[in-house]
Image: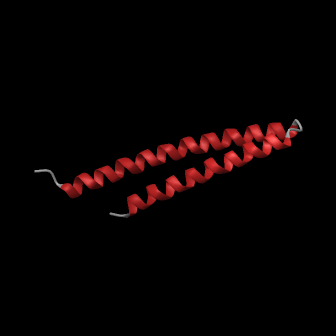
């Protein structure tokens, strides 16, 4: 007979790992968008740069949220 508590812990660990991987992807996207925004700002395209900067902030925020949830899963033991 399988231990439901052990299965739940394993699922939480797997979910936390997936969240962490997703957070890393979000950080990469945010970084790329920020670099693009800086370049467009230098070229005088400040409105487009602002939009990319907002998108960058959105992805950083998503990364932070994912990491917070992942951390809460590991401390729930």
Instruction: Please state if 5 lies on the left or on the right of 31 as rendered.
Output: left
Picture mark count:
0
Q: Which residue lies at the image location 60% right of the left edge and 45% below the top edge?
A: 27
Q: Nearer the viewer, residue 53 or 71?
A: 53
Q: Residue furthest bottom?
A: 76
Image coordinates for residue 69, horizontal then vertical, percent: 46, 57
Q: Which residue lies at the image location 44% right of the left edge and 55% below the top edge?
A: 70
Image coordinates for residue 14, horizontal then vertical, percent: 35, 47
Q: Which residue lies at the image location 68% right of the left edge and 45% below the top edge?
A: 55
Image coordinates for residue 51, horizontal then vertical, percent: 75, 44
Q: How is the image coloured?
A: secondary structure
Image coordinates for residue 37, horizontal then vertical, percent: 77, 41
Q: Residue furthest right?
A: 44
Instruction: Please state if 61 lies on the left or on the right of 22 as rendered.
Output: right
Based on the displayed image, in which of its 4 quarters is residue 71 positioned? bottom left
Which quadrant is home to the C terminus?
bottom left
Q: Which residue lies at the image location 84% right of the left edge and 41% below the top edge?
A: 41
Instruction: Please state if 55 lies on the left or on the right of 11 as rendered.
Output: right
Instruction: Please state if 50 lies on the left or on the right of 16 as rendered.
Output: right
Based on the displayed image, in which of its 4 quarters is residue 4 positioned? bottom left
């Amino acid at each position: 007979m399988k231990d439901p508590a052990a299965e739940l812990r394993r699922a939480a660990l797997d979910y936390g790992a997936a969240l962490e991987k997703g957070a890393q992807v979000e950080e990469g996207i945010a970084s790329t968008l920020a670099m693009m925004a800086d370049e467009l700002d230098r070229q005088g395209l400040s409105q487009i740069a602002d939009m990319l900067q907002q998108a960058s902030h959105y992805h950083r925020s998503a990364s932070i949220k994912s990491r917070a949830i992942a951390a809460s899963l590991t401390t729930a033991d």
